[in-house]
Image (tube, helix red, strand yellow):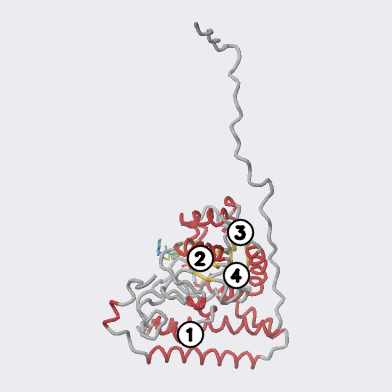
Amino acid sequence: MAKAPQKAPSKSKAPVKRAPKKTPAKAASRLPVLKTPIYKASKAELMEFYEQMLLIRRFEEKAGQLYGLGLIGGFCHLYIGQEAVVTGLQSAIEPGKDSVITGYRDHGHMLACGIDPNVVMAELTGRASGISKGKGGSMHMFSVEHGFYGGHGIVGAQVSLGTGLAFGHKYKDDGGVCLAYFGDGASNQGQVYESFNMAELWKLPVIFVIENNQYAMGTSVNRSSSEDQLYRRGESFRIPGMQVDGMDVLAVRGAVEEALKYVRGGKGPILMELKTYRYRGHSMSDPAKYRSRDEVQDVREKSDPIERLKAMLIKQGVKEEDLKALDKKVRKTVMEAADFAEESPEPEAAELYTDVLVGQY
Ligand SMILES: Cc1ncc(C[n+]2csc(CCOP(=O)(O)OP(=O)(O)O)c2C)c(N)n1
Ligand SMILES: [Mg+2]
């Protein structure tokens, strides 16, 4: 049978264009805007925050001295200036339920997890009594018991690992949330965005915490970031962001409470950008030629998180002598940690071959 002749396409009429198939939008609504209230702390809580921040500061000052004396080898990244971030955030999480992971600037995170300063200092000085038996050093410390999962030297790696920890919380349905800390420099790493995508897609219980201390080694955030408002970095993954004054422990605590409510409610991840500042060089071997002394001094004078809280406490009637006594107590704890470390032996040579592989899974 002869085929019906096909109609030649009419030249006068443009072929009918089909509208491209649309992927249904996930939701027409905008991203939720989370509140960032200032936490209303009791006097006792204010004193706790003060003591915690002071412990981190004095510990880090001591670590700096021990490094100068040659007692700490390798890398050592101090956290001085950023104390309000971990203090505020970790005061709100539940020990034994939540998890924490960070990069190499990790001493403060460990102390805020309640880890004994003795075993941290012993690790920094490479002693057998250190938390990683003296074989990890400043950047490689863990305490599963305290929910602290390192201590990572690869910039940005902890974000993917933290997303994995959050997956673990969801899978085990243990109600836990992971705080995955990283820097402004790390926020330009590719794996961070792969993690964001999966975390939101699977609604994982993770708070991505950007500690924006303004510099990644010698590069300022404005020089390296096309979008320097880092709290917006999750928007294209539909992750809401919060920008918080990371030099104010009460602002940090207030914001994280809102973030925790959201994440624990099963709504997925949150991105928190904490605007902060590091007073010391990137690591102990950084001559810090990329910024002026005046810049550092200005932040110290105007925004120091410890001085800020001290002024608040004095205004509330706490006596200067009481704060001095607290400082004395903290200095004693730190001195004892340094003594403990110095008195501990170095690991045996045979320990070189242990803890390399996990024996049992
Ligand atoms: C994948 C990778 N690239 C580069 C480095 C070298 N490096 C170590 S720290 C650092 C800067 C990171 O800065 P930031 O994320 O802002 O953290 P901060 O040191 O300010 O806490 C770089 C580039 C590294 N360790 N890992
Ligand atoms: Mg930085």
10 Å neighbourhood of mark 2: few (<14), some, or many (≥20)?
Answer: many
Which amino acid, by three-letter code, is at mark 2?
Leu
Circle 1/circle 2 CB separation < 8 Å: no
The disc placed on residue 246 is 4
10 Å neighbourhood of mark 3: few (<14), some, or many (≥20)?
Answer: many
**Disc 4 element:** loop
Q: CA distance from mark 2 to mark 4?
A: 24 Å
Across and down, in percent, residue 212 comes to: 54, 65
Residue 259 vertical position relative to residue 128 in the rendered view, above or below = above
Which amino acid, by three-letter code, is at mark 4?
Gly
**Disc 1 element:** helix
**Disc 3 element:** loop
Across and down, in percent, residue 207 comes to: 58, 64
Q: Which numbered mark, 3 or 1, is in the foreground of this view?
A: 3
Question: Which badge, 1 or 2, comes first in the chain's sequence?
Answer: 1
The disc placed on residue 117 is 1
Q: CA distance from mark 4 to mark 3?
A: 23 Å
Q: Which residue is mark 3?
A: 268
